[in-house]
Image (spheres, helix red, strand yellow):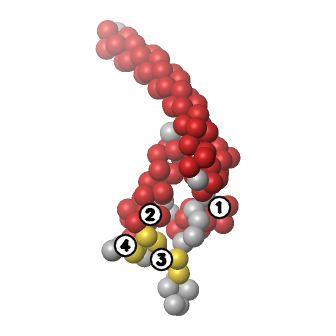
C-alpha cells in the first residue's frame, strides 16, 4: 500500500517550502505529482524519496541544470545508469573539493582563535 502525503506533510518531511515544491514541479524536477478530486497535490512515498535525493544534491551544491539532467536520466530508464553514475561521481568529486576547501578555511579560523587566545 502506498502512503500519500499532503503538501504540508511533505514540507515537514523534506524541509522544502511549498514554493520550492511548486517550482521543482514547474521546471520538471518533480514529475507526476498526483492530485485529489479537488485538485490538491497529493504526494506518494516515491515522491518523498525523490525529494530526499534532490535535497541531498541541492545541499551539496549541485546546480539546478545538473539536477535536471539527473532527473532526465532517471526517467529515461535503465539504459542511462552509466551516465547517472558518471554524473554522481563528478558531483562527488566536487563535494570532496568543497570539503577540502572548508577544512582549510576552518584551519584558518582555528589558527585565528588560537592567536587571540595567546594574545588575550
Splitting the image into 4 quarters, where does residue 75 fall?
bottom right
Q: Tag 2, which secondary structure?
A: helix
In which quadrant of the rendered image does the N terminus lie? bottom left
State which tag comes first along the sequence, 2 or 4. Answer: 4
Q: Nearer the viewer, mark 3 or mark 4?
A: 4
Q: Where is residue 18 in the image (x, y as percent from the top left)?
A: 52, 68
- Asked if marks 2 and 1 touch (Cβ < 8 Å), the reply is no
Tell me the tag on residue 46: 2
Q: Secondary structure beneath disc 1? A: loop
Question: In whole angstroms, how far apart are the C-alphas of marks 2 and 1?
Answer: 15 Å
Q: Do the residues labelled 2 and 4 touch (CB within 8 Å)?
A: yes
- What distance separates the C-alpha of mark 3 from that of mark 4? 12 Å
Label 1: how many Cα within 10 Å (few below 14, some 14–19, many 20+): some
Residue 2 marker: 4
Earlier along the polypeptide chain: callout 1 or callout 3? 1
Q: Which marked residue is nearer to the observer: mark 2 or mark 1? A: 2
Q: Which residue position holds label 3? A: 42
Q: Could you tell me if residue 109 is visible in this image?
A: no
Distance between the alpha carbons at the discs numbered 3 and 2 = 12 Å
- Which residue is at the front of the view, 114 or 55? 55
Residue visible at 38% across and 18% down in the picture? 110
Which is more toward the observer, 27 or 50?
Answer: 50
Of residue 106 and residue 112, the one placed in the foreground of this image is 106
Quadrant containing the C terminus is: top left
Residue occupying image coordinates x 50% and y 39%:
60
Instruction: Give x and y (percent) for residue 67.
Output: 61, 48
Q: How far apart are marks 4 and 1 (CA)?
A: 23 Å
Residue with the mark numbered 1: 28
User: What is the distance, in whole Å, between disc 2 and disc 4 at their CAs?
Assistant: 9 Å
The picture quadrant where one finds residue 88 is top right
Amino acid at each position: 500500500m502506498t502512503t500519500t502525503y499532503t503538501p504540508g506533510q511533505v514540507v515537514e518531511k523534506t524541509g522544502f517550502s511549498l514554493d520550492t515544491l511548486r517550482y521543482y514541479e514547474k521546471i520538471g524536477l518533480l514529475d507526476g505529482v498526483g492530485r485529489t478530486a479537488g485538485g490538491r497535490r497529493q504526494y506518494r512515498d516515491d515522491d518523498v524519496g525523490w525529494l530526499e535525493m534532490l535535497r541531498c544534491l541541492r545541499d551539496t551544491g549541485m546546480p539546478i541544470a545538473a539536477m535536471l539532467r539527473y532527473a532526465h536520466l532517471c526517467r529515461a530508464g535503465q539504459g542511462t545508469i552509466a551516465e547517472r553514475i558518471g554524473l554522481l561521481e563528478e558531483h562527488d568529486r566536487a563535494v570532496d573539493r568543497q570539503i577540502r576547501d572548508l577544512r582549510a578555511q576552518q584551519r584558518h579560523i582555528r589558527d585565528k582563535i588560537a592567536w587571540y587566545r595567546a594574545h588575550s
